[in-house]
Image: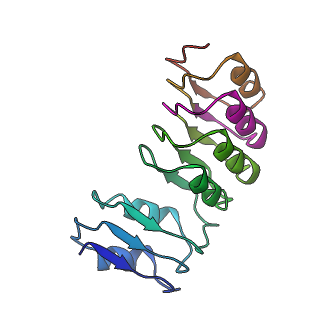
Amino acid sequence: MKMLNLSKCENISHIGIASLTNGAQNLEKLILSHSLFVTTDLAKCLLSFPRLQLVKLDGCLCQLLEELDVTDTEIDDQGLRSISRCTKLSSLKLGICLMITDNGLKHIASSCSGLKHVDLNRTSRITDEGIVAIALGCPSLEVVNIAYTSNITDTSLVSLSKCQKLRTLEIRGCTCI
């Protein structure tokens, strides 16, 4: 199976999706538009599809999603704007997402105030402006990875220093610091 369209299947769960796609290693497109509450379990389920290129979640309620790892994907600011509706996010991994900018981080910062872990490792288009927005909008940050983010300066460090719960900060390879 290469494509599965479950649009408007309002009661489908990650268990149902896993059952339908069991052994579907060639799945490239999964369309869940207007279908379900997106949860962390669904996000984990999606990781089992190595060839997955497209996941459509438009119109889905992501209010229960707590963790999202989209490391090394083509996600952009529009994607982050959609993710910002996941107001219960506590962990967001965006490492090596080369299309995101400060504008996308501002969307996250404005809606995901409970964020505790953010990974921005090797995000080349992120600057101090985005880090400041995250630091101000997400005061519960505990773990921040901005390693090899080349446009980060001391300004980011000053803003992150105000996050009183911060316990781990990864800044190696930041050449402007």
* Quadrant of the image occupied by residue 31: bottom left
Image position of 77 (left or right of 157) = left
Q: How many marks?
A: 0
Q: In the figure, 136 relative to 110: above or below?
A: above
Across and down, in percent, residue 13 comes to 46, 78
Q: Vertical placement of 94 versus 175: above or below?
A: below
x 66%, y 39%: residue: 102
**Closer-to-camera residue (84/117):** 84
Q: In what quadrant of the picture does the N terminus appear?
A: bottom left
Which residue corresponds to the image point at 63% horizontal and 28% vertical from the top-left? 167
User: What x and y, as percent, mark residue 112?
Assistant: 70, 52
Magenta extent: 121-144
- Is residue 154 in sight in this rendering? yes
Residue 143 in magenta stretch: yes
Is residue 32 shown above or below 11? above
Tell me, yes or no, if residue 114 can be seen here: no
Return the x and y of residue 58 as percentages of the image width and height: 56, 71
Q: Left or right? Give the position of 38 relative to 164.
A: left
Image quadrant where residue 16 sits: bottom left
**Which image quadrant: the C terminus?**
top right
Q: Using the rendered view, name the quadrant where residue 140 is placed.
A: top right
Looking at the picture, the colour scheme in use is rainbow
Looking at the image, residue 121 sits to the left or right of residue 133; the answer is left
Q: Is residue 35 magenta?
A: no
Residue drawn at (38%, 64%) of the image: 45
